[in-house]
Image (cartoon, rainbow, N blue to C red):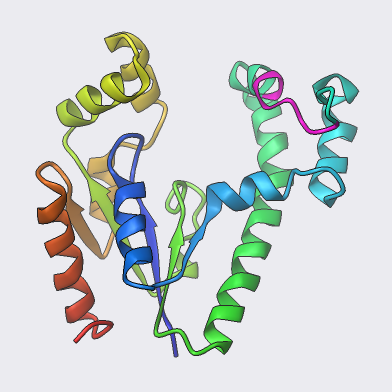
Amino acid sequence: MSLVIGLTGGIASGKSTVAKMFTALDIPVIDADVIAREVVEPGEASYKKIIEVFGKDIVGADGSIDRPKLGSIIFSNEEKREQLNQIVHPAVRQRMLAKKETYTEQGEKCIVLDMPLLFEGKLASLADKTVVVFVDEATQLERLMERNQLREQEAMDRIKSQMPLAEKAKLADEVIDNNHSVEESKKQLFDLLKKWEVME
C-alpha cells in the first residue's frame, strides 16, 4: 500500500518549496493547481461547461479561457465563484484520484497530493496523512510583498482571503515550520518521512 500524504499551506508559506523536496526524493507529487489548468483546456468537458455558464466572452483569441477575464467575474461574485468551483473541483478530484491509482499500481511507497484547498474543500479524507507548511503571519506578509511586489494592504487582503495557517495547522497531522531556513524545513520533512517509514 502507498502512503498518501496531503500537502497544503497558504500563499507564500513555502508549500511549493516543500513539494520540490518530495520531488527531489523521487516521491511523486500530484499538483492540484497544474491539474486545474489542464481540465479547463480546449476540448475538455470542463472547458465546454465553463463557456456554457459564463459565455463566449471569456474565450481568448487563441481559443483558451482568458483566465484574468474569468477571474474578474468570479472575484467579485460569490455565486459565480461557486458555479465555477462546482465545474472545476470534481474534474480536478477525479483526475488526481486517477493519477493516485496509477502510482499505487506502479508500487510507489509514497504519493503526495499537493492541494492548496485540502481542508477548505473537505478533501483531507483523500490522504492518509496531512501536512501543513506553516509560517507566522508576519513572515507570510513579508514574503508575499517581496515575491509579488505588493503593497502591504494588497498582500494582507490576499492572506485574509484564505483560511488562516494557524487553523490549518490545528487540522493537520503534522506541521512543517517554514519560518527559518530551507535546510531546517528539509530536516523536518526527512524526520517525518523516517517516522512514517517512507525513508530509512
For the C terminus, the quadrant is bottom left
Question: Residue 65: horizontal and vertical position, in percent?
Answer: 77, 31
Which quadrant holds residue 97? bottom right
Q: Is residue 140 left or right of residue 93?
A: left
Q: Is residue 23 left or right of residue 186?
A: right
* Rendered position, 135 above or below 189: above
* Rendered position, 126 above or below 77: below
For the N terminus, the quadrant is bottom left
Q: Is residue 152 left or right of residue 23?
A: left
How many labels, in total? 0
* Rendered position, 33 above or below 174: above
* Residue stretch rendered in magenta on the structure: 63-70
Residue at (68% x, 55% y) in the render: 90
Which quadrant holds residue 99? bottom right
Residue at (20% x, 23% y) in the render: 142
Residue at (73% x, 25% y) in the render: 66
Residue 19 magenta-highlighted: no
Residue at (31% x, 18% y) in the render: 156
Question: Residue 180: horizontal and vertical position, in percent?
Answer: 9, 43
Q: Is residue 49 left or right of residue 159?
A: right
Question: Residue 144: horizontal and vertical position, in percent?
Answer: 30, 25
Residue 67 magenta-highlighted: yes
* Rendered position, 156 above or below 185: above
Which of 36/52 is in front? 36
Question: Residue 166: horizontal and vertical position, in percent?
Answer: 22, 42
